[in-house]
């Protein structure tokens, strides 16, 4: 009997183990798996290599493909500041895009933030950016369609603030982190502390900070 079971096992095709992915975004977007609607961000799903698309009226569609999504090991939230990655996401249809790199690193004296420096007026940018901020946790920033240059630049500024929240969320109550986020988001430290306290998840806090930035400017 044992030999028979072994033979059956060898004859059965290998089934790849699905990865449990968590997808969040800057706007509540519909999630499609191989063209079928599966839910709305933020959400968790089992991923086995299918094409995933995030769609939102008024925003460019982000198509998330296997090479990006299967890079899902960041080293965990505790190491996210050093391990976090950002990728330009493939968009439905071809586009010419400049790589907009957002990097956040922890230093002895605090936090060094780099971002859209060097962005040239009229330069095309990726309509969406996907960031890996914890094991199999992806945050996708969707950019508005037909945005003006000013709207695009502000959206990038919000993206940088979200990136800092995602990358350093495990340090959210350290004075250096609060100060860096206050400067990056141009919000009072008291507001930053309140938003971090009221939003206990990285993606929730990231979006709350970005929303407060817009509210500050009456956008």
Image: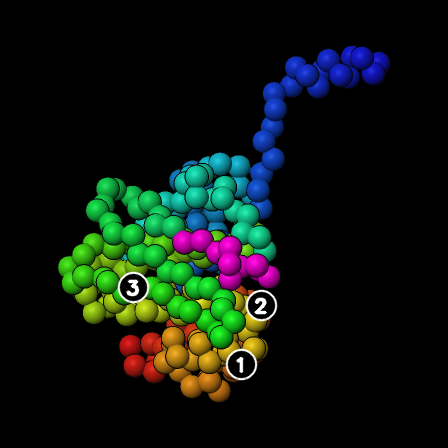
Residue 30 higher or lower than 204, as above or below: above
The x, y position of residue 12, in whole percent, is 65, 19
Q: Main secondary structure of the magenta part?
A: helix
Mark 2 surroundings: few (<14), some (14-19) or many (≥20) residues within 10 A: some
78 or 61: nearer the viewer: 78
Q: Does the magenta stretch include residue 83?
A: yes
Identify which residue is drawn at 30% across, 56% down: 100
Instruction: Measure how far apart labels 2 and 1 are at the Cα level.
Output: 13 Å
Q: Is residue 12 magenta?
A: no
From the image, tell me which residue sits under label 3. 116
Chain part drawn in magenta: 77-86
The x, y position of residue 114, in whole percent, is 36, 65
Q: Is mark 1 on a helix, strand or loop?
A: helix
Comes first in the chain, label 1 or label 3: 3
**Residue 170, numbered label:** 2
Identify which residue is drawn at 36% across, 45% down: 63
* Residue located farthest toward the front when viewing the structure as drawn: 108
Comes first in the chain, label 2 or label 1: 2
| Quadrant of the frame with the C terminus | bottom left
Comes first in the chain, label 2 or label 3: 3
From the image, tell me which residue sits under label 1. 175
């Amino acid at each position: 009997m044992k030999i028979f079971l072994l033979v059956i096992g060898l004859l059965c095709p290998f089934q790849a183990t699905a990865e449990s992915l968590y997808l969040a975004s800057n706007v509540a977007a519909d999630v499609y798996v191989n063209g079928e609607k599966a839910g709305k961000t933020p959400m968790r799903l089992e991923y086995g290599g299918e094409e995933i698309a995030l769609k939102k009226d008024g925003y460019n569609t982000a198509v998330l493909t296997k090479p990006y999504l299967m890079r899902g090991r960041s080293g965990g939230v505790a190491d996210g500041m050093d391990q976090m990655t950002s990728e330009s996401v493939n968009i439905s249809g071809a586009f010419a895009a400049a790589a907009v790199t957002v990097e956040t690193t922890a230093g002895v004296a605090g936090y060094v933030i780099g971002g859209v420096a060097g962005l040239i007026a009229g330069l095309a940018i990726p309509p969406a950016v996907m960031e890996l901020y914890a094991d199999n946790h992806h945050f996708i920033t969707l950019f508005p369609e037909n945005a003006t240059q000013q709207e695009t630049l502000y959206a990038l500024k919000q993206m940088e603030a979200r990136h800092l929240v995602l990358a350093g969320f495990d340090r959210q109550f350290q004075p250096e982190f609060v100060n860096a986020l206050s400067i990056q988001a141009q919000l009072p430290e008291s507001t930053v502390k309140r938003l971090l306290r009221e939003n206990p998840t990285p993606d929730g806090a990231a979006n709350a900070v970005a929303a407060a930035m817009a509210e500050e400017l009456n956008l």
